[in-house]
Amino acid sequence: MSAATFKFKVLPKRMAKKSEAASYCGLSEKRFAAEFPFPPVLMPGGEERFDLQDCDRWIESIKAGAHDGDVDAMIERLGK
């Protein structure tokens, strides 16, 4: 029996749909929409996508304690 070795590189995707970005952050879509501080990027063709680098920045800021949990800002985002 012979063995084969495959080498391939998977390119990670940078722009994600809201559901994908929420999942990437470990949140429901509703909670993601209420708490995520960065706006979506309007792509050619009119589709909105979220930059996963923004997700990473946000998560790092939470880990560093920069997330102040501003309730008024969160309520304002819920109304959008």
Image (cartoon, rainbow, N blue to C red):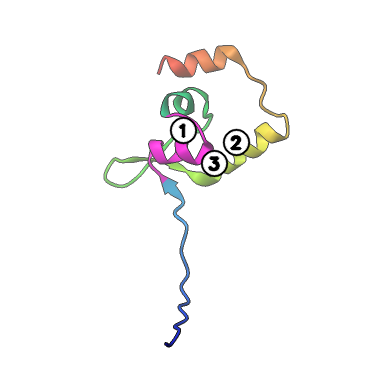
Q: What stretch is highlighted in magenta?
A: 16-28
Q: In the rendering, which numbered label is found on residue 58?
A: 2
Residue 2, x across and y down, in percent: 43, 87
Q: In this view, does 28 lie above or below 75?
A: below
Would residue 24 be counted in the magenta stretch?
yes
Question: Mark 1 is on which residue type?
Answer: Pro
Q: In front of the other: label 2 or label 1?
A: 2
Residue 19, x across and y down, in percent: 39, 36
Label 2: state its secondary structure.
helix
Q: In the rendering, which numbered label is found on residue 39?
A: 1
Residue 78, x across and y down, in percent: 45, 17
Instruction: Name the residue at 42% across, 87% down.
Output: 1
Question: Does residue 21 appear left or right of residue 60 in this picture?
Answer: left
Report crowding for label 3: few under 14, some 14 to 19, many 20 or more residues within 10 A (C-alpha).
some
- Relative to the observer, which residue lies in front, 78 or 45? 78
Q: Distance between the residues labelled 3 and 1?
A: 9 Å
Instruction: Name the residue at 53% across, 29% down.
Output: 37
Report crowding for label 2: few under 14, some 14 to 19, many 20 or more residues within 10 A (C-alpha).
some
Residue marked by disc 3: 54
- Relative to the observer, which residue lies in front, 25 or 48? 25
Marked residue nearer the N-terminal end (2 or 1):
1
Q: Distance between the residues labelled 3 and 2?
A: 6 Å
Instruction: Name the residue at 52% across, 35% down.
Output: 26
Q: How far apart are marks 2 and 1 (CA)?
A: 12 Å
Residue furthest bottom in the image = 2
Would residue 2 be counted in the magenta stretch?
no
Q: Are marks 3 and 2 in contact (CB under 8 Å)?
A: yes
- Relative to the observer, which residue lies in front, 32 or 73? 32
Label 3: state its secondary structure.
helix
Residue 35, x across and y down, in percent: 52, 25
Instruction: Name the residue at 40% across, 18% down.
Output: 80
